[in-house]
Amino acid sequence: MQILDGKKLSETICNELSEQVIRFKLSTGITPCLAAVLVGDDPASRIYVSNKEKACQKVGMESRLFRLPVTTTTEELLVLIEELNNDTNVHGILVQLPLPEGCDELRVLDAIDPKKDVDAFHPENVGLISQGRPRYLPCTPCGIQQMLIRYGIETAGKHVVIVGRSDIVGKPMALMLVQKQSLSQTGADATVTIVHSRTKNLSDITRQADILIVAIGRACFLTAEMVKPEAVVIDVGINRLSDGKICGDVDFDTVKEVAGAISPVPGGVGPLTISMLLLNTLRAANLSNVSE
Ligand code: GUN
């Protein structure tokens, strides 16, 4: 059984990125800059945003954090987004989700300039992904794809079962994996099934998977009986238990006994998500330079 070490992989990717950032700065005089917007004081969101800021600094990018009170209205957020859209020194814009109740998430995300949408949540970017000609790839699915590629896990013709149908992970991951490999660098030629909370006989389907990607947001949801021997298991969940411990959507201790490879939590997909955000921010700076 192999442990898919996302932490180590993300260090390798960040080293590669640092060099690319140096070269980009030398040739253009531009420092890639990410603007992160955090509304309210959800403890998990604060940690995620602070990790994203630290990662930017580590690879030589600029980050600007906009911390707004929980009482911020949709209109106020839209004013800030407009300012960031018009600021030529800001290349990527990230609004940390979830937004507090009462904020219109879709209106806010739709207002982000698609060229600065480093999360790839804007409908224009989602459309481009579904057609196999992405401008940006969403950070978590892109991180998972890097994990599969860099560990040499073959996807062509394999049955990938994705547990969870979110707009952030499940749906875009399926679009990327089902794509023809020859048409796009994001393609993977996999046979993809999405299962979710309303799926009947869910474990009959998960047991057919050569590769299982679990992003359902329930602690220890996937147990050993739901996994085919030697399957590759990728755990996207980050759940905080009542004792304060972090655990994934996969029951790691039992599943590792059947799986051929498994990603841990923490230290699996999470660090790769952040690396891909940095990659997208560099790409955004590149795009701004080309179109100017
Ligand atoms: N909340 C949970 N995951 C994400 C993500 O990838 N991007 C943003 N902006 N918010 C999130």
Image (cartoon, grey):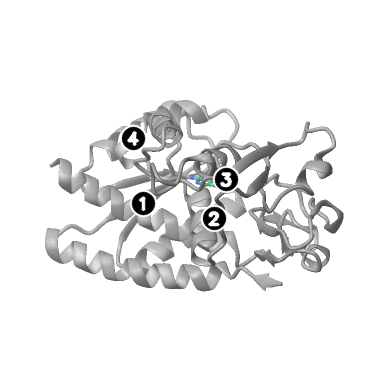
- Residues 106 and 44: in front is 106
Residue corresponding to mark 3: 190
> What kind of residue is marked 1?
Asn
User: As displayed, is residue 25 above or below residue 292?
Assistant: below
- Residue 280, numbered circle: 1
Asked if disc 1 and disc 2 are in contact, CB closer than 8 Å, the reply is: no
Is the residue at mark 3 in contact range of ligand 1, meaning its CB lies under 8 Å from it? no
Asked if disc 4 and disc 2 are in contact, CB closer than 8 Å, the reply is: no
As helix, strand or loop, the secondary structure at mark 1 comes to helix
Q: Is residue 104 left or right of residue 133?
A: right
Residue corresponding to mark 4: 114
Residue corresponding to mark 2: 144
Q: Earlier in the sequence, mark 1 or mark 3?
A: 3
- Residues 96 and 229: in front is 229
> What kind of residue is marked 4?
Pro
Which mark lies nearer to you, 3 or 2? Answer: 3
In three-dimensional space, the C-alpha distance between marks 4 and 3, rounded to whole angstroms, equals 28 Å
As helix, strand or loop, the secondary structure at mark 2 comes to helix
In three-dimensional space, the C-alpha distance between marks 1 and 2, rounded to whole angstroms, equals 15 Å
In three-dimensional space, the C-alpha distance between marks 1 and 3, rounded to whole angstroms, equals 24 Å
